[in-house]
Image (cartoon, rainbow, N blue to C red):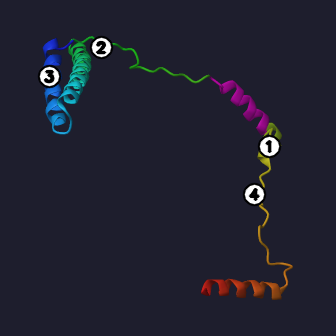
Amino acid sequence: MLGSIRWNLVLGLAGMLLTFFFSLGNNGFAVSCIRALYAFAAFFVAGWLLRGALQLIVASNESERAGEFRDVGTHVDLQTPDDGAELNEMLKAQRETGRPDDAAAAEFRPLEPKRVFSMEGKNPEDLAQAVRHLVQDGEN
C-alpha cells in the first residue's frame, strides 16, 4: 500500500468531524455521534481503497520506467486462409459456361412492390366526396 494507515485515520477523522458538526444542527447529540461513527468507517474504507488504487497506478508506472515491457497483446499476427485455388476453379467454370453457377444471382429483377392505393377503377363521384370530406375536416 502507498503510505501508511495514518492516512486512513486522518481521512476517517476528518469525515467523522465534518459529519458530526453538520449533523448536530438538525439532530440530537446521540444521533449525531452514531452518524459520525458511520462516517468514520466509510471514510476509513474509502481511504484504504484510494491508497490501493494509487499503489496500482504507481506500480504500473514504475514497471514501465524500468523497461520491463511485455510483448503480450502488442502484436497481432492474423492470416486469412489461402482460397486462391478454389477461387481460380470458380473463375474457370464461369468463363467456360459464360455465366455464374448460381442462376438466381445471374438474373436480376428489380423489386416491384404492390401499390397500396390506386385511383384506377374508382368512381369519380366517390373520389370527389372524399376530397370534400377532407376539406371540411381541415376547416374545422
- Please provide percent x and percent y for residue 81: 61, 22
- Residues shaded magenta: 82-95
x and y, in percent, of residue 75 in the image:
41, 19
> Mark 3 highlights which residue?
13
In which quadrant of the rendered image does the N terminus lie?
Answer: top left
Q: Label 3, secondary structure: give it.
A: helix
Q: Quadrant of the C terminus?
A: bottom right
Of badges 4 and 1, nearer the viewer stands 4
Q: Nearer the viewer, mark 4 or mark 2?
A: 2
Which of the marked residues, 1 or 2, is nearer the chain's N terminus? Answer: 2
* Disc 1: CA contacts within 10 A as few (<14), some (14-19) or many (>=20): few
Mark 1 → mark 2, Cα distance in angstroms? 56 Å
CA distance for labels 3 and 1? 84 Å
Residue under numbered circle 2? 69
Most prominent secondary structure in the magenta stretch? helix
Image: 36 above or below 123: above
Q: Is residue 139 above or below residue 6?
A: below
Q: Quadrant of residue 23?
A: top left
Amino acid bearing label 2? Phe
Provide the secondary structure element on which disc 4 rests. loop
Q: Read off the residue under disc 4.
A: 110
Residue drawn at x 80%, y 40% as measured from the top left: 102
